Image (cartoon, rainbow, N blue to C red):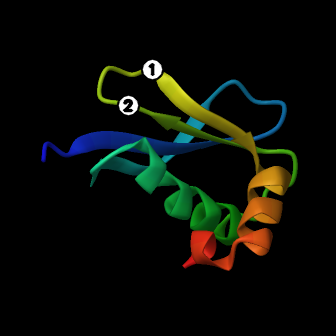
Amino acid sequence: MRMMKFDFMVQTSGESAVTVVNRSVALPNLSAAWPLVGALAHSVDKPGSVILVSNEVGQVVIRIGMAYARSLANIQPELAA
């Protein structure tokens, strides 16, 4: 199985720049990114921020607000594992 690489970023509310948190994370598919999104949401304390995940060609494939990502991880604790 070919692993895909994803970059995980945080964009702070009101800013155009993004902070890359994890670069070139190898995952088997996009669904495997959600546990990392949940963990990232709980580790970053920047209300109003957005988590962005881009694929190998730079396309944003996940864009989710920090609060919503936290609520999903709280509903499904395995996301924050």
Residue at the spot x=38%, y=31% of the render? 55
Where is residue 19? Give x, y as percent: 55, 43
Q: Judge left or right: residue 16 versus residue 53.
A: right
Q: Is residue 49 left or right of residue 52?
A: right
Judge the density around disc 2: few (<14), some (14-19), many (≥20) Cα neighbours within 10 Å. Answer: some
Task: Please name whichever residue, 25 or 49, is drawn nearer the observer in this view of the structure.
Answer: 25
Q: What is the distance, in whole Å, between disc 1 and disc 2 at their CAs?
A: 6 Å
The quadrant where residue 79 appears: bottom right
Residue drawn at (70%, 71%) of the image: 76
Give me the residue at 34% from left, 45% from top: 29
Residue 9: % across, % down: 54, 43
In the image, residue 50 above or below residue 21: above
Residue 48 picture quarter: top right
Assess whether mark 2 and mark 1 are in contact (beta carbons under 8 angstroms).
Answer: yes
Q: Which mark is residue 55?
A: 2
- Asked if residue 22 is positioned above or below residue 76 in the image, the reply reads above
Residue type at mark 1: give it: Gln
The number of numbered badges drawn on the structure is 2
* Residue 74 rendering spot, x and y as whole percentages: 78, 73
Decide: is 48 above or below 43. Answer: above
How far from the left and from the top, in percent, is residue 13? 82, 37
Look at label 2 and name its amino acid. Asn
Nearer to us in this view, 60 or 21: 60
Q: Residues within 10 Å of mark 1 (few under 14, many from 20)?
A: few
With respect to residue 78, does 35 lie above or below?
above
Residue bearing mark 1: 59
User: Which quadrant would the C terminus be assigned to in this image?
Assistant: bottom right
Residue at the far front in the pictured view: 1
